[in-house]
Image (tube, rainbow, N blue to C red):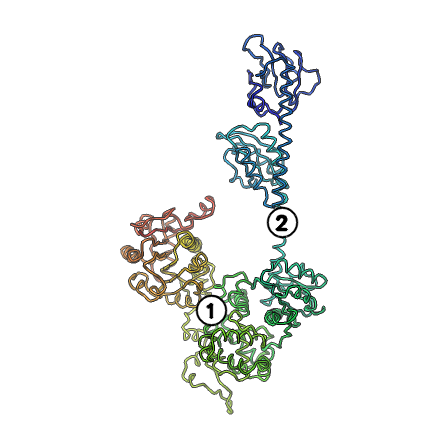
Amino acid sequence: MLTLGHLTAGSPPLLRWASTGDAPDDPGRLVERIMRCGPDGPPIGERTERVLLVTSADSDLEWVRLRAEDASGVVLCGETGDGDEVPDCGLVPVLTPLIPGGPVRVAEALMGAQVAALQAEVQQVETYTNVAAHAMAEGGGPEGVLEWVSRESHAEVRVVDGYREQDWPPEVSRHTALLRELVRGREVGPVRGAAQGRYVEVWPVGIGPPHRLLVASRDKPWGGRSRFGLEQVAVMVAGLLREEDVTERERRLHSAVQAARTSAFQYLMVGDVTSAGRAVEPLAPGLMAAGVVQVAVLEKAAEEDREEVAAEVEEALQWGRALTVLCPVDDAQLIIIWDGAQAPVQTVLEPVAEADPDRAVGVSGRGPLEHAARLYGAAAVSVEAALRTPGGVAVHDGRPPLAELLDTSARAWARELLAPLEQNLADAERRRLLEVCSAGIQMGSQGAGRLLGLHRDTVLSRMGELTGRVGLDRALLGDRAKLDLAMRLADLPPPVPGVVPAGGVRQVLDNEGAVMWGNGVLSGLPPRLLSALSVWVEHELDPEETARELGISRGSLASWLREAGTLTHLPLRKDRPAALHELLWALYTSGHVRPSTVTGSEREARRTAPDGTAEKSPEETGEAAETAGTAEQARSIAGQPPTDRPHPARAYDYFLGGRTNYAADRSAAQQSVEAAPAVAVMARENRAFMLRAVRHLAGHAGIRQFLDLGAGIPTEPSLHQVAQSEAPSARVVYVDEDPVVHAHAEALLSGSPLGRTAFLRADATDPARVLDSPEVRESLDLDQPVSLSLVALLPFVTDDRVAYEMIRGFTDALAPGSYLTLSHFTGDIDPGEADTVCEQHQKLTGTPVKPRTYDEVAALLDGLELVEPGIVLVHRWRSERSEEDLAEDDARVGSYGAVARIR
């Protein structure tokens, strides 16, 4: 669209400014029409808005103020009467032509310029339309259009969220009130202005309020063509944003449906049918009301897209009540939960399996929803058989669960074994612990983690916690199988009061139904495989020892195990612990392995003697565990720390949201919070600082070795989890002298297969002993850079000289290029709060704590090269939080943090 700026600054310019008085030189004035008029002006009643009036220089222009105040401007042709004097037309600018001729000639030239401008606009519209069509076809949103417009107009053109005023460019700050009206939809725009040497136009874009804002900014005024272009750009961007929003909504809806399906499957796997029903009913009405269900597992071909296969399955299932789930455990599998009252699901899925010879469908028998986990296991086992079956479909009708074949004394035994869980655990905590461990037993730590959205180390730690609480050893196959059997029995209706518990797992399994069950499991095995399985179990599933005793290679053993798994319908892999436990029970009840394989660490009666007394095994005679009358005594004998008294490491774990703490620890922690409310914030921000520092050192500084002094209980995410998520080959050694920390760390630490994680029980104030220990020497190469972590440790070293010498003992021994990560409790921010924290710690542990000032912390780091931002409050070290958010926590954090490079 034509403007005065286009006419006065074009190439060549046709007019020049000649205004006097109040009329500004306004290049942005639009010109919609050119009108030639006589000395008396245009006819009375003629519209003059956005009209450029061309008249002779001898006109007195009085008519301008009377009836043309809204004109774009007045062009005076010829010499004015008083030489250079120009009449005052108020706010209407006066211009003179730079082309020769009278009003007719000048008006014709201006009309020619207007026609050229219109032609350019048409061409521009066509160009913008092509760019927008290309962007819409690409589906990438408006970014491509904005980049093209920025390049063509030599400007910065972008879209900002209207409600995020902090993202608005500074040159529009004086127009904040007007922009808020655009965002709210109360004005249609645009808003124009100039500030800080930039000329800005802002247009509202988007489907509806709150609008986003199209902000265009450059260092010269926007001419008519540019303004017209921005209006078109705003229209195009609005359309692209609408399509992007619709696409995003569709994607979110699809993701929400998939998440609901996955949640339903997760609930079913942990036995929570009620919660599963709430998730399933909107997706598959009537399915949860089914009396029985079938479960099928479809494994796609290697090169297929799982989403496309899922759509194909949905098409095949559309007439039946079913739920299709993208398996969260295996990326190659789909899970179908089918109403068992309908035709068998395998008949529906056969065409899907036959569509690709590399697909396989495993199908379970029918069963109640409460047994969905067992049905899923049966279907998953059948997939391997389906791969070798013509048509690609195999059905495993299942077998009655062993737990249901045992008598009520077995259920009483299970409840007695799990009784310690009633101590120091609230109902919700106990239920969640059992859910996680049940999934871990069914699918292994990796599969359970993916199913439940947890890190595999979390699952391992929960299983370690559970076995520790009930006095079992997670390292023994027999103890793991015993816990599995107890949990299955505990899910059954409780025994009637007064039932005497079985004396141990061997008495539980000495049952006619169990013997029949075990023989049925192994009935299809040839002697070769039966013998191999017995040896494998006797050697605690060690493939090296098993292959050596059988005189075969490990590859042959793996092939035998796959064959045995197909025949027994048990996936004999370490990522399916429940199947391995069933194999152990079947081998024991059928007499193919020694009794000690199922008893694990248990000291129990072998059989009931004729006189009614229990026969003892030789190794059990005189064992103190037989006479341990209480759970606490048994835990002490097993080397577990007492849990009836608070411990600072477990209380710290509680502050961090960990699970390695007990009622006494939680009670003490709450008392500390009541006395010093900031103490929990201090703990969490210390841990967050440490994790950010580790992520920086492993991800950006290239450090692959970490030595953590005063590690404490490894609450998740731990240092090694973060380091190995950035660099799987990272090696980590934790050091702590606390026996309670040592007891828990042994159960909780498990690193990446490519890296290494070790624990050293030692005094961190003795650098020589730590660095010369086998744990450090075997795990770390001290000739290469190491990250030394001293997070929240030095407040417990109250002697400044000892603290300084301790740091130097390590830093002097580490290779150049190593780093020290340090955080320290301080009283600089709130001395009163710091004193209260010190008093509470002294009361809880009997040991003193020393806060240090900024200068004292800096002295400890003397000689080291500080990494930006230097010594700051821990929550400010390389945080992504806003300044306003950080400022709110300044008074509560109470710890300095720093990372320094060892030169």
Going from N to C along the chain, the mark reached first, 1 or 2, is: 2
Q: Is residue 266 left or right of residue 286?
A: left
The residue drawn where x is 71% and y is 64% is: 320
Work out whether 698 lies above or below 630: above
Q: Amino acid at mark 2?
A: Arg
Spatial separation of the CA atoms under disc 1 and disc 2: 42 Å
Q: Which residue sits furthest top?
A: 81
Residue on which the image places disc 2:
249
Q: Which residue sits furthest bottom?
A: 610
Badge nearest the viewer, 1 or 2: 2
Nearer to the camera, 872 or 234:
234
Q: Would residue 501 be visible to someone looking at this image?
A: no
Work out whether 419 lies above or below 700: below
Q: Secondary structure at mark 1?
A: helix
Q: Secondary structure at mark 2?
A: helix
Residue 303 found in image quarter: bottom right
Q: Position of residue 488 (x, y in %)?
A: 56, 74
Residue on which the image places disc 1:
464
Q: How many marks?
A: 2
Q: Amino acid at mark 1?
A: Gly
Q: Position of residue 313 (x, y in %)?
A: 66, 62
Q: Is residue 903 left or right of residue 651?
A: left
User: What mark, if any, has residue 869 been given in the picture?
Assistant: none
Q: Is residue 25 left or right of residue 348?
A: left
Q: Mark 1 Cα within 10 Å, few/some/many (few <14, many 20+)? A: many
Q: In the rendered view of the protein, which quadrant contains the N terminus?
A: top right
Nearer to the camera, 120 or 170:
120
Q: Mark 2 Cα within 10 Å, few/some/many (few <14, many 20+)? A: few
Q: Position of residue 559 (x, y in %)?
A: 53, 74
Q: Are marks 1 and 2 in contact (CB under 8 Å)?
A: no
Q: Would residue 342 be visible to someone looking at this image?
A: yes
Q: Position of residue 735 (x, y in %)?
A: 36, 63
